[in-house]
Image (cartoon, grey):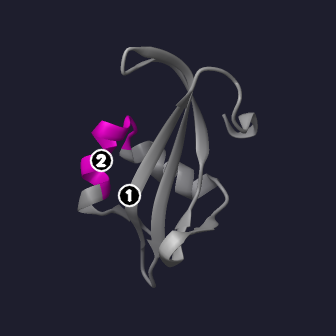
Amino acid sequence: MKPIRLSGHAKEQLFFRGTTEEEVIETIKISPWQPAELARLESRKNFTFEKEWNKKYYKIKQVRPIFVEEENEIIVVTVYTYFFEGKDRDENNV
């Protein structure tokens, strides 16, 4: 697989979105890719979370990087993170 690099924006958003660079890279490496807006790609992966985020307890965290595949590397443009209380989102990849 090509090297994965996070853009400045994506790196800045990691803390605010509650995810890590390692989770973003893992998601891209092992989850299926799908087309996203603006000719970009996306993938999603659920992680067991089982802790609080913004003063609320969640069991699952879903990481959704948005990226482009260049000739020599994959560039992550941004990343979204979703939190779920229970086992209600694509459990097969937790």
Q: Is residue 2 visible?
A: no
- The span from disc 1 to disc 2 (Cα, nearest Å) is 7 Å
Q: Main secondary structure of the magenta part?
A: helix
Residue 22: in magenta span:
no
Q: Which residue is mark 2?
A: 13
Q: Which mark is residue 34?
A: none
Secondary structure of the residue carrying numbered label 2:
helix
**Marked residue nearer the N-terminal end (1 or 2):** 2
Label 1: how many residues lie within 10 Å, few (<14), some (14-19) or many (20+)? Answer: many
Residue at position x 44%, y 15% from top?
Answer: 56
Residue at position x 32%, y 44% from top?
Answer: 14
Q: Is residue 88 above or below residue 80?
A: above
Left or right: 79 in relation to 14: right
Residue at position x 60%, y 44% from top?
Answer: 45
- Nearest the camera: 72 or 65? 65
Please state the extent of the stretch shown in magenta in the rendering. Answer: 10-20
Verify CB contact (< 8 Å) between mark 1 and mark 2: yes
**The C terminus: image quadrant:** top right
Measured as percent of width and height from the top left, residue 92 is found at 76, 38
Measured as percent of width and height from the top left, residue 90 is found at 72, 39
Q: Amino acid at mark 2?
A: Gln
Q: Is residue 45 above or below residue 49?
A: below
Label 2: how many residues lie within 10 Å, few (<14), some (14-19) or many (20+)? Answer: some
Q: Which mark is residue 78?
A: 1
Q: Is residue 20 above or below residue 42?
A: above
Secondary structure of the residue carrying numbered label 1:
strand
- Nearest the camera: 72 or 43? 43
Measured as percent of width and height from the top left, residue 20 is found at 38, 41
Q: Is residue 94 above or below residue 67?
A: above
Q: Amino acid at mark 1?
A: Thr
- For this orientation, the residue located farthest to the bottom is 71
